[in-house]
Image (cartoon, grey):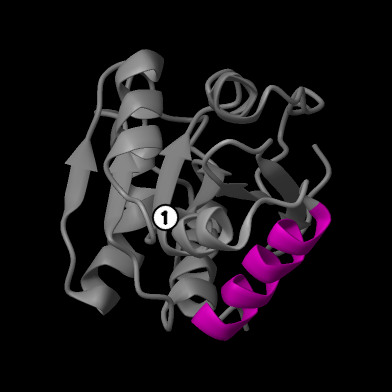
Amino acid sequence: MMTRRWLVAVALLATATAAPLTRAAAATTADSSTTILLVRHAEKDTLMVGADPPLSASGLLRAQELARMLGDTKLAAIYVTPFRRNRQTAQPLATRLGDTLTVVNAIDSTVTCLRTKHYGQTVLAVGHSNTVPQIIEQLSGQKIPPFQEGEFDRLYVLILLPRRLASVLALRYGAHRTP
């Protein structure tokens, strides 16, 4: 299970592998790092007609797994897009944590919020197959492989540290299903 302790270990690893700073700057950096968890929405119901389909039964199970996995993590915010599948992916976790969802409409506003509003905190962002890679690249300068059709199990952990390159860790969660 991914706990705050695990995320702190990832943050310490990122700090240890980044370029050294002065002692005073290192103390400031440790206090202002941001941990960003990024996932693509869970499986959508492809049998539903329309532009905003809900999650499928598999997607609902994946959303529950995300809530189980991150349920002990103190999140400062959960960002989603206006689409139902994104909200449904994050809602079980928000309910478990007693949190609300913050809806963002554009990649640039999402990146700005993630970069500037959560120093020293952990946040979750639920995106799409085409937005998660763009968000990661804008925040870290690193490119990730594009999502394959039917790929919903990636979880990215970004550690943002002032005046340093961001660290990106790629994980998997829930069942891996091949299309």
Q: Pointer 1: residues within 10 angstroms few (<14), some, or many (20+)?
A: some
**In the image, residue 35 lies in the stretch drawn in magenta:** no
* Residue 10 picture location, percent across and down: 69, 67
Residue 54 appears in the picture as rendered: no
Q: What residue is shown with label 1?
A: 32
* Residue 137, above or below 114: above
* Residue 151 picture location, percent across and down: 72, 38
Residue nearest the observer in this picture, 41 or 73: 73
Quadrant the C terminus occupies: top right
**In the image, residue 9 lies in the stretch drawn in magenta:** yes
Residue at (71, 45) in percent of width and height: 167
* Residue 154 picture location, percent across and down: 69, 48
* Residue 40, above or below 30: above
Q: Is residue 177 left or right of residue 36?
A: right
Q: In this view, does 131 lie to the left or right of 147?
A: left
Q: Quadrant of residue 111?
A: top left
Residue nearest the observer in this picture, 166 or 108: 166
Residue 100 appears in the picture as rendered: yes
Residue nearest the observer in this picture, 121 or 20: 20
Examine the residues drawn in magenta and state their main secondary structure: helix
Residue nearest the observer in this picture, 149 or 139: 139
Q: Is residue 117 left or right of residue 72?
A: left
* Residue 14 picture location, percent across and down: 72, 57
* Residue 167, above or below 52: below
Quadrant the N terminus occupies: bottom right
Instruction: Identify the magenta region.
Output: 4-17
Amino acid at the residue labelled 1: Ser
